Image (cartoon, rainbow, N blue to C red):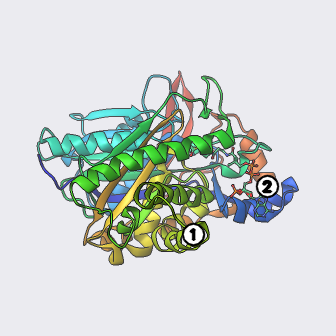
Amino acid sequence: MKTSVGIEALAVALPRRTLHLEDLARARGVDPAKYVAGLGVREMAVADAGEDTVALAATAARRLLEANQIDPATIGLLAVGTETGVDHSKPVASFVQGLVGLPRHMRVFDVQHACYGGTAALMAAAEWIASGVAGGKSAIVICSDIARYGVKTAGEPTQGAGAVAMLVSAHPDLLSFDLGLNGTSSAHVFDFWRPLGRREAVVDGHYSIDCYLEALAGAYREWRGKAEARELVRRGASALPSEQLAALAYHVPFCKMAKKAHGRLRRCDLDDVLGAFDEGREEREAASSFERQVAHSLTLCARVGNVYTGSLYLGLAGMMQEGAAALAGKRIGLFSYGSGCASEFFSGVVGTAAAARIQRAKLNEVVGSRERITVDEYERLMALAADRPPEIPPPPGGFRFTGIHEHRRQYSAG
Ligand code: CAA
């Protein structure tokens, strides 16, 4: 089994428009501090007409291929993680294969399990390569979603949209996975779901937070047991096991969730390793370890909002952009959560070429080139029919949905 497998490169695609949460708060008669400090979110991406899950995924895939000069013939697997696909049968991956010109001889499929689908796809791709059956080929895994709860709901400030495309290979310049260490935790719960025919998710918001934290504790403890067995982290060392990870990225439905998650992760260590501890001191230490280990992963998430499957990987992108050089050669931890629920805690070592690779994603340009819209314009976009064609053509390098002809969805490239 090949041991060096992971993420070689990534690319991000976002809707062209963004809503500032302080504007939304004022329009809703809510203290802006609730959204900005209470939920930790500054902006949320708003999908325009034509910017559907396929268009975002294909745009991210094209950026990945072009920025990293990938020969499509080297790709043997394309998997899309999404919970907001566009057809009950034809996967988003199939559209992407055609739109970006990927070869005929490859596995092409979507994976659905709420926000966890992208991680399931990523692990399937990595383990396919590690097993040796990939025959030297690489995989592309894309997480693409439009998070939609609806106007004037409690979930409204936690919407967002976007896609993250990742090249998975035996040359993991960004992150080499610790294969075999992953911890999982899943259960049949109704914390968040979207019945067939609905555009908006149904969510039991506060219960969903409890489900997330419960899953995190289970998945982390399983990972920690395996990491201890391989002596990658140690109890009794001066630092807690989780502090022996140089950085952590969590699934980020809203940025405050990462803070809650980090507190719970540390609590697992404190309960299991120390037993008794001083609560006041822990509060201070949790705050400083959050700044050190987690804050970098929130820079992009705070400006995009929830991207469902892509949120964890947008967090990873932000972490790499802020500190790839300092993290090179160091182990980091990642937690993926999908409602329903399924979760996975996994780890990997940041590559020495990570800083150079992440630069190719031009993330400042992707985030910085968006247009700020008013709340009136956001509400107009939310009221548009799902299959409304766009008002403007796709930008250079991007894709847009353009309409349905004889039941067939049409796209154009810029
Ligand atoms: N100034 C500063 N902070 C304020 C404030 C003010 N004026 N007013 C309130 N706050 C704080 C609150 O204290 C609270 O912080 P804590 O949680 O740290 O106590 C925070 O702002 C939010 O306030 P509420 O809990 O009162 O907010 P709410 O009830 O309106 O809804 C929510 C919050 C449940 C997250 C809701 O937005 C929601 O349902 N979102 C969608 C579901 C979701 O994201 N779930 C996350 C876990 S599930 C998952 O991760 C999968 C997925 O992607 C969906």
Query: What quarter of the picture does the N terminus occupy?
Result: top left
Q: Which residue is mark 2?
A: 375
In screen coordinates, is 57 left or right of 47? left
Three-letter amino acid code of the residue under disc 1: Gly
Name the one closer to the observer, 167 or 253.
Answer: 253
Q: Could you say which disc has been placed on residue 84 in the image?
A: none
Labels in figure, total: 2
- Cα distance, mark 1 to mark 2? 19 Å
Secondary structure category for the residue under label 2: helix
Q: Residue at x 32, y 56 (%)?
A: 347
Residue drawn at x 35%, y 63% is: 332
User: Residue 368 bears which disc, if any?
Assistant: 1
In this orientation, which residue lies closer to the viewer: 219 or 155?
Answer: 219
Q: Secondary structure at mark 1?
A: helix
Q: Is residue 100 above or below residue 4?
A: above
N-terminal of the pair, mark 1 or mark 2, is 1
Percent of width and height locating residue 141: 35, 45
Mark 2 crowdedness (10 Å alpha carbons): few <14, some 14-19, many ≥20: some
Residue 356, quarter of picture = bottom left
Asked whether mark 2 lies closer than 8 Å to ligand 1, one says no
Residue closest to the eye, 116 or 49: 116
Q: Position of residue 7 (x, y in %)?
A: 29, 56
**Residue 85 drawn above or below residue 160:** above
